[in-house]
Image (cartoon, grey):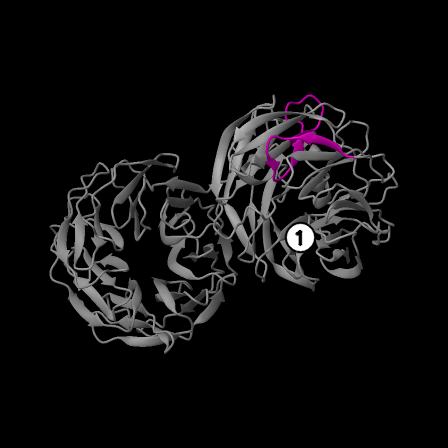
Amino acid sequence: MRPLLRWSLLILPLIATTIGAPARLAAPESAGAEANSRSCRPFFDNHFYATNNGHEYMFTGLAAGDFNGDGFPDLAGNRQDRLSILLGTAQGKFREGPDADNGGAEGFMVAGDFNGDGRLDLAISSKTRINILLGNGDGTFRHPKPSPSNMLSTFMVTADFNGDGRVDIASVGGITPNLQVSLGRGDGTFQDPVMYATGDASNGIAVADFDGNGTLEVAVTNFSHPIGSEVSVLPGNGDGSFGPKVDYRVRADPTAVVAADFNEDGKPDLAVAGYLGGTVEVFRGRGNGTFRKPDLYQVPTRNSLWGLAAFRFAPGDRIGLAATGTSGTYVFVNNGRGKFRPAMGYNPASLLPVVADFNRDGRMDLAFATGQYLNDSIGVLYGKGDGFFATSNAYPSGQYDVTAAAVGDFNGDGKRDLAVGTYNSLGIMLSEGQGRFGPVVHSYPISPNLFGIAVGDLNGDGKLDVATSLSGGLTVFLGKGDGAFAHAGDFPLSGVGEGRPRLADLNGDGILDVEVSADASLDVLLGKGDGTFAKPVAYASGRVPYSLLLADFNRDGKLDIAFNDGIDPAVGVLLGNGDGTFQNEIETATPQYPLALASSDFDLDGHPDLIVPVTSREGDSSVLLLLGNGDGTFRVSTAFSGFFRDIAAADFNGDGKPDVLAMSGEVLLHLMIGNGDGSFRMGETTYMGTDFDANLLLTLSDLNHDHAIDVLLPSHAGTVGVLLNHCGQK
């Protein structure tokens, strides 16, 4: 493992305080010689493949299989107007293949060898037909041939229901109360479908031998809101026909069902996803076609579920579950007795889960439809084989609208925990190691409108404390050292607090002080060493500070303040006197209006610089680089183009040169790799999901102790997104 780079303290004193630095914060150091001589590819092993190409319709079907016969799984995504093909590579990535004509079939899709030639084909549902696209074995498909259908299928499965060795299709239609079974002829055509009564709005389907008689049964979910909902099991007769259904009530409007032996007793079980309640119910099978009362599992609030998949994360592992929904993909790890651990969330919003080992590492991966309207991308989460996936994790806070997050070892176990702020509460989530976190274990009410959180030892007892900035002032919680906190007091500001607080020793007495924005001033509250603070000293800026940071811009060993307000085309700097007071503002004009600030030595000349996203009233946007002169003034140049609402700086790829992470209004994270001379090149771009807002601030910290900077991002869905940087994991 490489050592933590010395220059990383130059990012912000915030970074040092959130990972449990001592009370007195040293002045930033220049870039040292301990950086890696070579860089690595930074985080985000989640990949999103744009397939829109001008199409306006959302994905209605997604299927995986080796369509071109090269031994690597491929993906097919269906829309109302077209079929998109992504061809897999040896690395588990994808390249865009040729689009195919779906014949106007706008429904669900499954893959199978329908004509027995050893090549995968596709079946796509329409209102009056199922279009069969026979595969050519090279990633292309023949012109669709219709087979009769009585409904537009929302879910389909393939199986051999009559034991003739040919692939059959069973489907449900979402708004119809029927199961449709189409028996295959083995030449790519199907017999006329037979309908079986199920229940109102059947929209999920699974197949297994539930009664152990050697014939396949079908389980169907029925959405009957507000009367009631159930999962219906239709016993198979072995000849492709089915008997009358048997119903099992479920608690929430079901959208999907899967069958698997979760408790490994040799008897198939059922798992059912609920739409409105965000629930998963697991029915354990008795082996005679009946089921026990279900166990109920919940995903974070405000998350409706659309899809469900059951699979082994790695060979020999227990069967787990993945549920897709409005705010992400949620994975349930099996504890070995058919019970499941609390859901782990992964962003972004997703639909139509498909499972395959895309990168051929023996671990199962997940593919899904995603994008702003679930129509412009296919996402892939690469599995680690233990129920976790190499991507952004979403941890539920138990509340709506997480507005801030910070990091510190709150229980003294050497692992970095999370402090999570919502509109009116502060929650503590303890680390489980390796950058993973448990649920909220302590929650504390606060006054409304929490804007930011800072972490440090405010009373000198060696235990980390928390300071929160609210619209009404500053609230302090003193840590007990076991993950719990005690309310220490509320401290008024000179005006309405509106920003994230910054902790640092501003007057050189070894005690942490607070700097925070309040109305049209910058407030400095000197710490007393017991967790309380003196009255604020306000430094009038003439405008409302929008974002601010601390760094030693004139290299005199004293911390200075840089800020912007998002209204005036300028960045202001207050040089520190080292006694907790500051000089008059030095203003650096910018051609447009700054929206955020981050600091590092981007040209490696020993002087702190600023990176600043800006925009004009006409909508022209870019990112400015303000190169420091070493005296608190700057030279302004353009770093790169684009509209970004928040920005952060760190050496994400381990080459000793500061990089930039910028968040755009489209909820995209853009990584710009620094060249060490003040210029940048494009790195990764990651879609975070619609519940993440560019107005919610990025937080950086080494969450898993691998000496690489990771990312925290709050969301409106009551979760905290965690993106682990892979550069420190080798």
Q: Residues within 10 Å of mark 1 (few under 14, many from 20)?
A: many
- Residue 673 visible here: yes
Residue placed farthest to the bottom in the image?
227
Write the residue at 26% across / 58% down.
157
Write the residue at 34% across / 41% down.
51
- Corner quadrant of residue 209: bottom left
In which quadrant will I find the C terminus?
A: top right
37 magenta-colored:
no
The part of the chain drawn in magenta is 585-610
- Corner quadrant of residue 484: bottom right
For residue 227, side relative to residue 490 (left or right): left
Between 624 and 87, which is closer to the camera in this rendering? 624
- Residue 241 visible here: no
Q: Amino acid at mark 1?
A: Phe
- Residue at label 1? 451
Numbered disc 1: secondary structure: strand
